[in-house]
Amino acid sequence: MADPLFELLLPYFDPPSPRSVPDVRNPVTAKYLNRLSTLPLSSLTTTEPQSLAQNSHTTLLSLQSLSARSNAAIVASADHLAQLSDVLPDLINDARNLQNDIPKLDEQTVAFSAKYSRSAENEVLDRRKKALLMARNVDRLSDILDLPTLLSSAIASSTAQGSSTAMNYGSALDLYSHIKRLHLLYQDSELVNSIYKQTEEAMQEMTSSLIASLRSQNIKLAAAMRTIGWLRRVAPELDSGTGLQSPGASREGTLGALFLVCRLATLVSMLSALEPLRDLADQETVLRERNKSNDAKPRDAWSGGQQTERYLKRYVEIFREQSFAIISMYKSIFPSGEGAAAEDIGPKFKSLELKSTSQHTSSVPTDDPLLPLPSALSTFPLHLVDLLANTLKQYLPNVRDKSSRESLLTQVLYCAGSLGRLGGDFTLILTSLVGDDEDDEDEDEEKDKSKKESGEQEALGEGEAGYEWVDVMKKHRELASRLELLASGVGASSKSIPSRAALSPTAP
């Protein structure tokens, strides 16, 4: 029905009509023609024109409102539409190029997949794996990197506290053991090797600090034993024996000699602190040497050695305290392996000379006749006594007063007895000391007595002076016996105390 109706209306679209001919295949046109066929003839002439005019007006208002709201979008759309004719050819060319490059992209994709597959070996993948592994273990690596800093802090704090309270050394040694264990497990790791080198430098500083602490003046036995124990852990090569010592000797290794050297340096430094008194004693020595010359003047007379007496008393006192402390501390820290006798380390004297006669019954099988090597303590008392003997030989002739000389010699005897408790008695050294001193005195006395006394009186004076050390030893033994009697609780009456004649070496 729509087609005949459309044919009836078609002449109305001919020119000069401004309207174009609608397309009958348009769904809107077909729908409207179908609607017209259903309307009565009266509606076509009355209501339909009004309805069309109203719809046209409504559509116009809607278009005006849309134009007002979407003016910018419509203008932009128009511009893009104008450029669309130029863009479409470029799009077509790019699409064609992309189509041509797809095979190459596929080839590169296949090559990348083959090169970076997990089954293949690749440096880039290895570095990436290492980076990922490092990222996962960053906390552990941070802890490992902090180990040298912690070790240095523990050592520094212990050094600042001093040897008596340096308890952080134990923590430092624990850290050092942990780092050594890491170094043994991961010897190929550059990081661990670097940390181990830093640790070795820190441990060298710790070793130096420990050795320096052994030279402190007021070190106690507990602190010394603790320090030696730390040195055994820090430097085990010092503790290992040479293998050339006798089986009965103590296995102190090099630590024993190190300990004795440090304590000897402390003793020498304490004795060198007496330099002001020694200078005064040297002045008296110069005056004594002047008096020996033939051109001595009365103004060169000297007081008799009071300053030398002060120096020697203080010297012997320090020597007695420190020498006893050194040897007793050594024996406590490095006990003998088989409980060797004390005289194995003590010097014995023969013909008024310092000669050690310590013998080792056991021997190490070797071709060297100088082996086995003795303990470091076997010759140390000889050095100490030689140090004291040289000082006494140099300054004792300055002391001319008899009571002062006897007081000094008695003090030396007490020092010898103190070392004798540890196997280092050097009482017989007095014979050589006093003998040399008396020779000088006799020379002076001969010059004075040649003008006043006869040869018989001079010989009598020499005979009496030659036994000065005997009198000193008699008095010392008498005083020692009194002290023993008082200590043992025996009656303190004079009858119970033996006489000097009974205590003399020639008494029956």
Image (cartoon, helix red, strand yellow):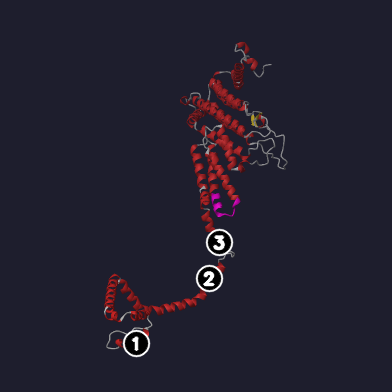
Residue 238 in the image, given as x and y percentages of width and height: 61, 42
Point 62% across, 17% down: residue: 488
Q: Quadrant of the C terminus?
A: top right
Q: Nearer the viewer, residue 315 or 82?
A: 82
The mark that comes first in sequence, 1 or 3, is 1
| Residue receiving disc 2 | 109
Mark 1: give few (<14), some (14-19) or many (20+) Cα within 10 Å: few
Q: Quadrant of residue 333?
A: top right
> Which one is in front in this view, the residue at disc 1 or the one at disc 3?
1
| Residue receiving disc 1 | 7
> Which one is in front in this view, the residue at disc 2 or the one at disc 3?
2
Q: Quadrant of the N terminus?
A: bottom left
Q: Which stretch is magenta?
A: 185-197
The mark that comes first in sequence, 2 or 1, is 1
| Residue receiving disc 3 | 126
Dot 2 lies on which element? helix
Residue 15 in the image, given as x and y percentages of width and height: 28, 88
Mark 2: give few (<14), some (14-19) or many (20+) Cα within 10 Å: few
